Image: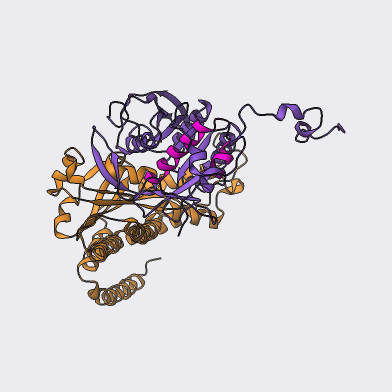
Chain colours: A orange, B purple
Amino acid sequence: MTGEPGSHDEPAPDDGLIPTLHAVALRVEAARRLAPAAGTAVLRSIVEATVVLFGAEAASIALHDPATDRLVFEVAAGERGEGVVGLAIDASQGVAGYAFSTGQPLALSDVARDARFGRATAEQTGYVPRSLIAVPLVDDEGVLGVLEVLDKRGDGGFDLHDIELATVFARQATVAIRSSRIERDTASLLRAVLLAADAVGPAGGDTAALDAIIATEIRTMDADSDDPLWALADQIALLRATDPGQLELVRDLLAVLVRRADHGRSSRGRG
Amino acid sequence: MSQTLPAWSEPFSADHRAALRRLAPLGDVAAIDRSWAFGTGDGDGAVVAIVDSGVEGDHPAVAGRLRASVRVELDGDRASVVPDEAVDAVGHGTACAGIILGRAPQAELLSIRVLGADNRGKGLAFATGLEWAIGQGASIVNLSLSSRSEALYATLHDLVDRAYFANVLLVCAANNVAVASYPSLFAGVVSVAAHDVRDPDVWFYNPRPPVEFGAYGLDVEVAWKDGGRIVATGNSFAAPHIAGHAARIRTAHPGATPFEVKAILAATATPPV
């Protein structure tokens, strides 16, 4: 690398760094594949608790997808609310879009009285609510999405106390989403590794160089490759999602496999 | 360095004090009560800017009081204010317009749309829209939304000061969520949350900020999108009630400055118990 034009004074990045990065990236990707069910499970428990505590017909959480700028409904609770899962709406439209765009909670009642309101959207879900609350999922870093609660049981619509309560649930959801995303944020982890290793020559904290290295590494990670590691990670993720109690057994099996692999390597004299 | 008086003292010195006289001072105030505060004030002469999702010009509740509609267009990190159709992407801006006109029917409205597919409520759009409203000399700006952007903290703080000194009153909905949001948290605005009394003429003053006023925001029957009406709850419906009352005060007392209007609102607030 030295002697290339434009690199006169800066030594090449440490040759051992890239393989290290690769190893870290593989581990992060494996962790990401193992983790996703956990994130959704927490969200689901939040919407279920929301339905119970409000005595509501339905509750759902929509998360913002920056790539399409839409709010995608990820989880829902309540029989009548299930139809909304998978629905994607424009992030600036409707009540959910307003709560998301402004970070302001909003509650509407007598929704059915206005023939036009949200009917098109609600009809996709087979359910036109009488009343609803939309509360943003927000923290210091921004707005992640929206929590909606539909049709509190009883005569009254949602009141100010209900908005406050929904805000509490929204905060829990935001924390859960944020912490699971931090674990899965490959770029942040790689950057942290690089900075700690102080590996980018005298440029030190040159973020442009860091970004270039990270972008290259991410591009070369093929998440759909048929490396048996991915297959194994996927199987474990599936097992964890369906039967977390079996994970202990899986861990024991893996420990056995690792010991056997080590045995195999050393007995073949691999250097 | 010059040894003359600092600039701030000069206006008060004997040979400059004549310039301190105001065109329309508050006048003799025996008691600050609602009849003095409002007089026959109906918003006539007050221009209220609504920074929101747009205002539906042909909604019956808007009643032809919408003077102009603009939107903020973003191009990377450059923002510009361009003319917009008098439409409302959500219904929220129209709801605010209807509430303001309900209190101050002769007020004129300006709509600044900062929400929608083309700017999606970005902090830069919000700051640009607010700056434009201040530059238009709006009497009151209703902000039912705030920005969480730390990067905009200084810009918004500066805009709030600029509004204050330009005699523009900013009325902001307090943010329910426990994260910092600007400018609703700044001292230079009138911050408003919702109380639980279904009466537009009831508002409370809170001597322990940051939220200084509580106004009608629970089960408010409001105008909504496509000529409709709906019942809504939230701090963002309380703020326009205060904005409407402020418009009446500014009609009755055209010389009142933003801090005087705030003081009058506090002095005429409903006794809490």
User: Residue B119: percent from the left, percent from the top?
Assistant: 38, 34
> What residue lies at 60% left-to-right and 40% top-to-bottom?
B29
Asked whether the viewer can see residue B30, the reply is yes
Asked whether the viewer can see residue B145, the reply is no
Q: Is residue A44 above or below residue A134?
A: below
User: Residue A193: percent from the left, percent from the top?
Assistant: 49, 57
User: Residue B219: percent from the left, percent from the top?
Assistant: 30, 49
Write the start and end of the magenta stretch as one range.
Answer: B236-263
**Front position in the image: B72 or A154:** A154
> What residue lies at 32% left-to-right and 26% top-to-bottom?
B86
* Left or right: A149, with B191 as reference point: left
Helix, strand or loop for the magenta stretch, by majority: helix
Residue B48 image-quadrant placement? top left
**Number of numbered discs on residues:** 0
Residue B45 drawn in magenta? no
* Left or right: B231, with B6 as reference point: left
**Front position in the image: B76 or A133:** A133
User: Residue B193: percent from the left, percent from the top?
Assistant: 43, 50
**Quadrant where the C terminus of chain A lies?**
bottom left
